[in-house]
Image (cartoon, rainbow, N blue to C red):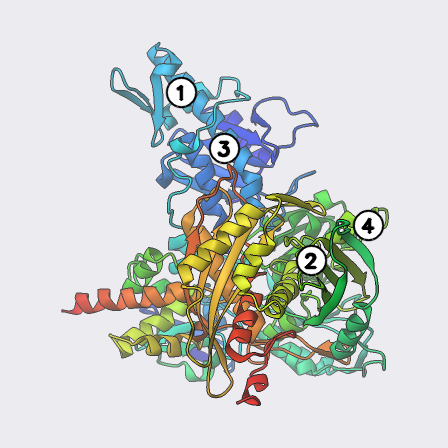
Amino acid sequence: MKAEVTINGARHVVDIDDDTPLLWILRDRLNLTGTKFGCGVGVCGACTVLENGEAVRSCQVPGSELHGRSFTTIEGLSPDGTHPCQRSWLEEDVAQCGFCQPGMIMTACALLKRKPDPSDADIDQTMSESVCRCGTYPRMRTAIRRAAVAMRGHET
Amino acid sequence: MITTRRNFLRTAAAGGASLIIGFDRLGLIKAATAPTGSAFQPSSWLRIDPDGVVSLTIGKSEMGQGVRTSLAMLLADELDADWARIKLVQAKPTKGSDLGTGGSDSIRSGWKPLRKAGAAAREMLATAAAATWQVERNTCTTGDGAVVHGATGRKIAYGDLVSDAAKLAVPENAPLKTAAEFRFIGKRTRRIDGHDIVTGRARYGIDVKVPNMLYASLERPACAGAVVAVMHEDRARAVHGVRNIIKLPGGGIAVVADSTWAAIKGRAALAVEWSSAPKDAFDSDAHLQRLEAASRETGFITRKEEPPAETGAVTQTLEATYHYPFYAHAPVETMNCVADVRDGRCTIWAPTQAPERLQHRVGELLGISPDNVEVNITLIGGGFGRRLGVDYAVEAAAISRAAKAPVQLLWSRADDMKHGHFQAASVHYLSAGFDAAGAPVAWKHTKAGSFHNISPLDPKETRDAGWYQDWSWGAYDVPYAFPGIQTAYVAVDLPVKHGPWRAVFAPSSVFAREGFIDEVAHVRQADPLAFRLEMLRGADVIKAGTTTVDRRRLRRVLETVRDQSGWGVKLPEGRGRGVACNAYFGHTYIAYVVDVALGMDGALRVERVVAAVDCGVVVNPIGVEQQMEGGIIWGISSALKGEITFRNGAAQQSTFADFAVARMRDAPAIDIHIIESAETEPFGLGEPPVPPIVPAITNAIFAATGKRVRRLPVRPELFRAAS
């Protein structure tokens, strides 16, 4: 089947099997490898992308449901890595191996869109859907609070 | 881009303008254009180009320990480099190289060579500038990538000096800076590759694409010796995009396809059913029983200290048995490898910690020299020792050979959980003897465990006490001053794959040792932290087996967590505070005070960790904090989350649901105190934070509940029943 899908603002027509998950379209067809495979069953969060600002697990979106939809991946989050979440991630020295971090950053972006001033419980609840084996959780918490402040300041 | 020695030399010959220095792990340095003798095989390179860019080619794998940043800092400091112009290049293994990354060794092994290379280059650049200006060398200083003549305010950038500097002999003993002169070492330094990570540009093994690459998924025998009972090859071949189905020598069935998804689907369509497991197939419960029985044997004595004659006779004995389970590494990036076998050669792209082992194993498989296996080391999405094994690369090479194409093999999450080289289970039998006055006078710790089997043991090695100590870190090197000490090791055969896992043999032994010393303190009705300090009295420096332990450093980290945690304050009902400490190989000293809270549902939460660490010279404080935090959270996973169990020869867990790991909600508040060390060298910190955190947690659980945890992971049911 042919699906027309918009990724990071660019329209793509991809010829795929209807069950091909968005994750593998991004990685194998469009060479957008910033979106990671970690489990394939939607429990680790490494493949998280944004759709209308909401977090979506790209391994759980089949090709048959893609037509006409628009997604943002880590590569398209900002032109030069200056999204408040990306900046706060660097300022708080979050990453260790970094592999889960694109998914974590996208998850945090969606949280902050939904809740611009999240409580610690909101942060823990949302981010606990994802796995970081290096243990960057304490720094992610701080980075999300920092990004929230930066984003609210930006809006006013 | 990967730069080899040959490329370096070619560039140097063609341009003739770059300053290139090769060096090895012993710190031998030579200009690249110097004639190479067999005695000098550089594995690392420093190159400064006319545009001022400093390229550092090193073999250490980056897997989250920040090694690219911290090693670059060592070089930059002595070179007085401009940090913004440093570029890291990944070395490839060459004949006789030893690029492996493990044992918390990167900073230790890089400390001298990188500084010597930087100092030599700085000396050459300053000498070249002095010659240009016709002034004395000692009137020139260096800083931010330039040589400065203070008296006249003249300045030449390094890039403009490399052509002249390259003509000079490499000084063998250029002076190194004193600690007071360090400009990078000890300073909080951001990750050199941080921007790549947050923008998704960082390329891990899984992200490698080579022209005409095919994708493979591999179905492995469910347990050792299993054969295919039912398989639907026709259905797999009918999947769109499936190219080939390959039966591997080890019994696996590989599906090779045009895309990752087609390979995954094709493998599912195969719907392989394996022959049922033999009656005696491996079972972890039965294995733990064997270990427990073995822990009562005398075993090989790894350390024995007879009590002095005046020591009181033992009139009372306390004993306990500690059980330690199997764990998976479960890095978020599953095992993967790209292999391209052709024309008697093999090219590999792999997230690996052991490139030379990989060369040898793939060479063995293909019947070619290891020198004909080219290894491109990629970024690693979590190592933790798992990628010291090279099984996934050997599989990829076997598939590529049969498919006659470059192939990327990607393990599923279930593959990764079920076919790891696991942290092996062990059982520890401990006893303490008290004299008639109640004084602790004897300590005994017998570990029943298993030798690693991911690489064959050398049968020619002498199996002396030192050799056995290597399998029982944290047991033989007990730092406490018991007049009589006996530690022993009993080897129990373990047929499933097992190998190094973060901190290797120490976590099990330290869990048992630090739990049991708490039990001894309890019998003595002593405060467990004060009791440890009391038991660290006597000689400041002791020889424990092959390890030297500096008790002053251990006392200091304990005193620091005591003072910083508010130790001794009574906590409310349902809360408890525990302590544990460890000297990792006598190198890195860590103590923790942990607060836990028991929920109404029996769930335990680690609320706060106060840590003190003495790792010698601190290169990057951010790196120290990250490794400490990561090690603490790793320990929370192993104390409170998942374990691997085996039935019918197979691991039963396959996802992050049934092998749970800590999530953000499990992360405590962490307060780290870095000791200003008296040491003049840095020690490692990837592994050392792990061993003492688990017993600090279980000791806190005892303080909160009165229940002694001697079996991991902790089960909430244990506490639900009590309430």
Q: Earlier in the sequence, mark 2 or mark 4?
A: 4
User: Do marks 2 and 4 share a chain?
Assistant: yes
Is disc 4 in contact with disc 3, using a CB cutoff of under 8 Å? Answer: no
Say what secondary structure mark 1 lies in.
Answer: helix
Q: Nearer the viewer, mark 4 or mark 1?
A: 4
The residue type indicated by label 3 comes to Arg
Say what secondary structure mark 2 lies in.
Answer: loop
The structure residue drawn at horizontal position 48% and vertical position 46%, both measured from the top left corner, is: B68
Residue on which the image places disc 2? B475
Horizontal side of B668 relative to B395 (left or right) equals: left
Disc 2 from disc 4: Cα separation: 23 Å
Q: Nearer the viewer, mark 1 or mark 2?
A: 2
Residue on which the image places disc 1? B126
Is disc 4 in contact with disc 1, using a CB cutoff of under 8 Å? Answer: no
User: Do marks 1 and 2 share a chain?
Assistant: yes
Q: Could you tell me if residue B409 is visible in this image?
A: no
Q: Choose top left, top right, bottom left or bottom right for residue B139.
A: top left
Seen in the picture, residue B211 relative to A23 is either above or below; the reply is: above
Of all chains, the one bearing label 3 is B
Q: Earlier in the sequence, mark 4 or mark 3?
A: 3
Residue on which the image places disc 4? B458
The residue type indicated by label 2 comes to Ala
Disc 4 from disc 3: Cα separation: 35 Å
Residue on which the image places disc 3? B115
Of all chains, the one bearing label 2 is B
Q: Earlier in the sequence, mark 1 or mark 3?
A: 3
Disc 1 from disc 2: Cα separation: 51 Å
